[in-house]
Structure formats: C-alpha cells, structure tokens
C-alpha cells in the first residue's frame, strides 16, 4: 500500500523555505510510529532538510540530478521508479514535498493527513484531495495545548474503488 503522509494547514500549506512552519510534537511521534521500518519516498529537497537520514527507514530520493548520491539511500529520477523500489505487499510512505505529493497522488492508496487548523504563508502546498476519488474514513480532532500552538486533526483518506461501466 502506498500512503501519502503529511501535515498541512487549512490552506494546504506544507512549508516555507524548505522548513516546516509549525511544531507539533505529537504529530512527529505519529509520523515516526507509522513510518518506522518502512520505505519512505521523498524529493531531494525534503531529504536535504533533515539533519541526517531518519533512523530505521529505507530512504528513496527522487531527483532530476543525474549524479546525485546520498549514502545509504536509493536515488531515482521518477515517482514510478521510486514505487518500483518499494517491496510489494508492504506499506510504503510518500513523505514530501509538495511536488512529490502531486506526482504521487495517482499512485497512492491512502492519505494520512494532519490538518493544522490555521492558515499560513508558504511556498509548498499539499495537492487538493478530490472527494470523488477519496473517502474520509477517520478524523480525530486534537485541541491546542501547552506543547501545540494550534488545533489539528488526524484525517485518514482511502481511495475509493473505481467502478467500471
């Protein structure tokens, strides 16, 4: 199963200047819990925003740079090649950024989206989720608290089955 996992604001903002805009510790814990032990697919700029590769995950980096190398990572030049590198029958995760989410939308089976209930100025955005293609199957509201400056929700979408006519 290919799952896109992201945190986006109400206005679909993901980040600015290759950085996250907010800090939600519980969302980081959820991300780690869901992706540990799996293949994660990301763009080069997302990978380079990390201080080091994320532990206990196989990194697949999509880049147009033909000579790009990242130690211990798989480097490819398309979303199709990235998905081919993922083991069949196992969960794999698309982790960003905005352009990669857009490319991955047709290949994804599930979306784990943390919606931050605020609008932000950004230069990277999550693509529109077309409700004719996706069903919201779970939404868990989390109120702001001393560690979280904004209300947020964990939303899970599953791709609707295509009907043949």
Image (cartoon, rainbow, N blue to C red):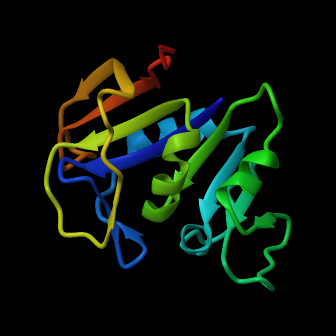
- Answer with the quarter of the image where residue 63 lies: bottom right
Q: Residue at x 31, y 36 (%)?
A: 130
Q: Is residue 95 above or below residue 120?
A: above
Q: Is residue 23 above or below residue 135?
A: below
Q: Residue at x 25, y 46 (%)?
A: 148
- Position in image of residue 2 (x %, y %): 62, 35
In what quadrant of the picture does the N terminus appear?
top right
- Answer with the quarter of the image where residue 144 lies: top left
Residue closer to the observer: 109 or 28: 109
- Position in image of residue 77 (x %, y %): 72, 69
Q: Residue at x 29, y 64 (%)?
A: 21
Total marks placed: 0
- Answer with the quarter of the image where residue 42 lies: bottom right
Q: Is residue 39 above or below residue 49?
A: above
- Position in image of residue 12 (x %, y %): 26, 53
Residue closer to the observer: 142 or 81: 81
């Amino acid at each position: 199963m290919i799952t896109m996992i992201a945190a986006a604001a109400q206005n679909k903002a993901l980040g600015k200047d290759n950085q996250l805009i907010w800090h939600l510790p519980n969302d980081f814990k959820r991300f780690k819990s869901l992706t540990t032990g799996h293949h994660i697919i990301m763009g080069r700029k997302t990978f380079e925003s990390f201080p080091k590769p994320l532990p206990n995950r196989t990194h697949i980096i999509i880049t147009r740079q033909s000579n790009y190398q990242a130690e211990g990572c798989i480097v490819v030049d398309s979303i199709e090649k990235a998905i081919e590198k993922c083991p069949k029958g196992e969960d794999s995760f698309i982790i960003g950024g905005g352009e990669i989410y857009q490319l991955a939308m047709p290949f994804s089976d599930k979306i784990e989206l943390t919606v931050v209930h605020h609008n932000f100025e950004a230069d990277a955005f999550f693509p529109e989720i077309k409700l004719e293609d996706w069903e919201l199957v779970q939404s868990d509201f989390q109120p702001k608290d001393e560690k979280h400056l904004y209300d947020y929700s964990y939303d899970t979408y599953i791709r609707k089955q295509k009907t043949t006519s």
